[in-house]
Image (cartoon, grey):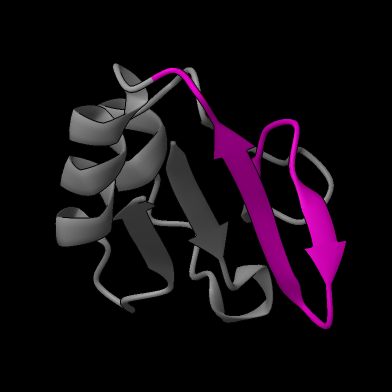
């Protein structure tokens, strides 16, 4: 299982995550911040849990590219 977490309120809208993992991330037209698609929000953290192991690599690349380090990716 892959768990991806986004701390959206700290997003600066650089768009790196969308370029590297477009199936998980999308830019909001309302505020210019990223949206973690199909996520559940809890206390400012947006999380998805997926059994699709193929999303790990691109999500991890997005995590590495994020200049404000607001993306966490775990394989459990």
* Left or right: where 1 falls relative to 37: left
Residue placed most toward the observer, 39 or 34 = 39
- What is the quadrant of residue 55 in the picture? top left
Q: Where is residue 53 in the image (x, y as percent from the top left)?
A: 33, 22
Residue placed most toward the observer, 16 or 61 = 61
* Left or right: where 66 falls relative to 38: left
Q: Quick check: 29 above or below 31?
A: above
* Left or right: where 19 falls relative to 4: left
Q: Residue at x 84, y 47 (%)?
A: 30
Residue placed most toward the observer, 45 or 32 = 45
Q: Which residue is drawn at 31% across and 39% down?
A: 59
Q: In which quarter of the image is the N terminus?
A: top left
Q: Quick check: 7 above or below 16?
A: below
Residue 30 in view here: yes
Looking at this rendering, what residue extends furthest in the front direction?
A: 76
Residue 26 in view here: no
Q: Residue at x 65, y 55 (%)?
A: 47
- What is the quadrant of residue 21 in the picture? top left
Q: Position of residue 15 (x, y in %)?
A: 39, 44
| Residue 33 is covered by the magenta coloring | no
| Residue 46 is covered by the magenta coloring | yes
Q: Position of residue 37 (x, y in %)?
A: 68, 32
Residue placed most toward the observer, 29 or 68 = 68
Region rendered in magenta: 36-52
Q: Quick check: 9 above or below 64?
A: below
- What is the quadrant of residue 9 in the picture? bottom right
Q: Residue at x 50, y 24 (%)?
A: 51
Q: Position of residue 54 (x, y in %)?
A: 29, 16
Number of numbered callouts drawn: 0
């Amino acid at each position: 299982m892959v768990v991806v977490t986004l701390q959206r309120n700290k997003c600066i809208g650089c768009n790196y995550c969308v370029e590297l993992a477009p199936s998980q991330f999308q830019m909001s037209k309302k505020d210019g911040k990223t949206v973690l698609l199909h996520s559940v929000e809890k206390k400012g953290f947006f999380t998805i849990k997926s059994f699709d192991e193929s999303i790990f690599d691109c999500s991890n690349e997005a995590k590495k590219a994020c200049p404000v380090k607001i993306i966490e990716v775990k394989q459990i």
